[in-house]
Image (tube, rainbow, N blue to C red):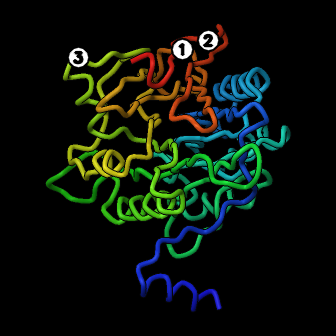
Amino acid sequence: MLRLILCTLLLFNIPFVFGQNGILRFNNEGIFKVVQFTDIHYKYDNQPKSKIAIERINEVLDAEKPDFVIFTGDVVVSNEAFKGLDIVLEPCIKRNIPFGVVFGNHDDEYDKTRVELYDYIASKKCNIMPRRSGESVPDYVLTVKSSKGNKDAALLYCIDSNSYTKIPSVPGYDWIRYNQIGWYRDQSRSFTTKNGGEPLPALAFFHIALPEYNDAVIEGKNRMFGVKGEKVCCPTINSGMFCSMKESGDVMGMFVGHDHDNDYAVMYKDILLAYGRYTGGNTVYNHLPNGARIIILREGERKFDSYIRTVNGIESRIKYPDSF
């Protein structure tokens, strides 16, 4: 029966995504809080240096009490990846906080493939990722329900930004592929149609920055909050993801990691381009106190607040779009 349904969807070009595990919802005050942890770079074979990452995760979760946690790649970077994931994800699980994961360029360089990692995470308590179907890791969209009733009130797009190109003439980091962009456009169109033609407020999460992160800084006229401590390490080919999000009209902001010494947020053509704060310990290069980015959505509004939390407190408070 499942195969018949999938064939029918494909035949008539109907967009689909397998349902998320569990429900995300705005609270009674119309608030939905997201914590973004990125680049934990946990090494199971070097736990002493990785310990600070787990300490910070616990501190942030206790301080913020989020409704959802997203890990934006380079989570475990050693063999015994499953054991490393057990340790990294436990702070969410023991607090019953829903979480999701998107992968970075280093996650599958050790003893587990991307598919194996996804399936293992998707088997965990409190994960809200849809079960995988097919032979690859899926992109997925999570719905945040209204505080009252069961209406879709906001969207969280979780996208795999891949790792390295396989084209010899185009070395460097891979890009978000055309079929992924098509998937996004189909999902966005479907939710917008269901909402009477009005795009739902949405955020997007992935690991490697888009070229527009660099463009926004080069322009020199866009207000920026936070630290730019290194160059933007992005693909050298622009596959059109930003353009599609701009045309679709739902994504207010996108949040990435990958560049450990960047945590800035900059507005570019009315979409916020933001980095998370490096969360890891001293297992790889970093020059900023480790921490997390917090995003607070407000029900019924195309607005959100964001800031960085570290052991030293809160930094770089912004309001979208008012701060820009």
Q: Give the percent coordinates (x, y) of residue 162.
A: 40, 53
Residue nearest the viewer, comparing 289 with 110: 289
Residue neighbourhood size for the residue with mark 2, other residues' Cα within 10 Å, grouped as few (<14), some (14–19), many (≥20): some
Q: Give the percent coordinates (x, y) of residue 165.
A: 28, 54
Q: Which residue is mark 2?
A: 314
Residue depicted at 27% across the width and 59% down the height: 166
| Amino acid, disc 1 | Arg
Q: Give the percent coordinates (x, y) of residue 256.
A: 45, 36
| Identity of the residue furthest to the front in this view | 196
| Element class at badge 1 | strand
| Element class at badge 3 | loop
The reply to whether discs 3 and 1 touch (Cβ–Cβ < 8 Å) is no
Query: Which of the 4 image quarters holds residue 35?
Result: top right
Report the Cα–Cα distance between label 3 and label 1: 20 Å
Judge depth for marks 2 and 3 and give the one in front: 3
Q: Which residue is mark 1?
A: 317
Q: Give the percent coordinates (x, y) of residue 122.
A: 68, 59
- The relative height of residue 29 versus residue 203 in the rendered view (above or below) is above
| Amino acid, disc 2 | Ile
Report the Cα–Cα distance between label 2 and label 1: 8 Å
- The relative height of residue 203 versus residue 318 in the rendered view (above or below) is below
Residue nearest the viewer, comparing 205 with 284: 205
Residue nearest the viewer, comparing 2 with 123: 2
Side (left or right) of 144 relative to 259: right
Residue depicted at 21% across the width and 59% down the height: 167
Residue depicted at 47% across the width and 35% down the height: 255
| Element class at badge 2 | strand
Residue depicted at 36% across the width and 64% down the height: 182
